[in-house]
Amino acid sequence: MRITVPTARILAALLADPGADRYGLDLMQATGLASGSLYPILHRLQDAGWVEARWEEIDPAEQGRPARRFYRLTADGAVSARQALADLRAQTAVPGVNPQVKPA
């Protein structure tokens, strides 16, 4: 799977609490992505087996809102996401530069 910056943002948000169910608006706020970017990425992650989705079981009339679709990393997806983010960090690191040292 190709990991773009928006995909990395979504994976990082999901990895913040891998066992938690997250819904679209929550992920949009956590990542700063618009729905037009977020949902296609979530669908690709689902197709790859990294993310599973389920509909919230509520009565929309009783709750006064539509049911939410929840997303969560699969066990394999969490492992793959951690590895992909580590690989991305390694690729973007500049050799010989300590990111904690600030220029004077």
Image: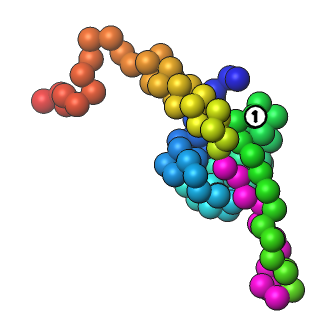
Residue 67 shown in magenta: yes
Q: Residue at x 53, y 44 (%)?
A: 15
Q: Is residue 83 visible?
A: yes
Q: What number of labels is visible?
A: 1
In the displayed structure image, the side of residue 65 where residue 80 appears, left or right: left
Residue furthest to the left in view is: 104
In the displayed structure image, the side of residue 90 where residue 85 appears, left or right: right
Q: Residue at x 26, y 11 (%)?
A: 96
Q: Residue at x 70, y 23 (%)?
A: 1
Quadrant placement of the C terminus: top left
In the picture of the structure, the residue carrying the numbered disc 1 is: 49
Residue 78 shown in magenta: no
Residue 5 at x, y percent in the picture: 59, 33
Residue 93 at x, y percent in the picture: 39, 19
The residue nearer to you, when weighing 34 against 60, is: 60
Residue 89 at x, y percent in the picture: 45, 24
- Circle 1 sits in a helix, a strand or a loop, which is it? loop
The residue nearer to you, when weighing 48 against 100, is: 48
Residue 98 at x, y percent in the picture: 24, 22
The residue nearer to you, when weighing 25 against 102, is: 25
Q: Is residue 23 above or below residue 101?
A: below
Residue furthest to the bottom in view is: 62
Residue interval drawn in magenta = 62-72
Q: Is residue 44 visible?
A: no
Which quarter of the figure has residue 102? Answer: top left
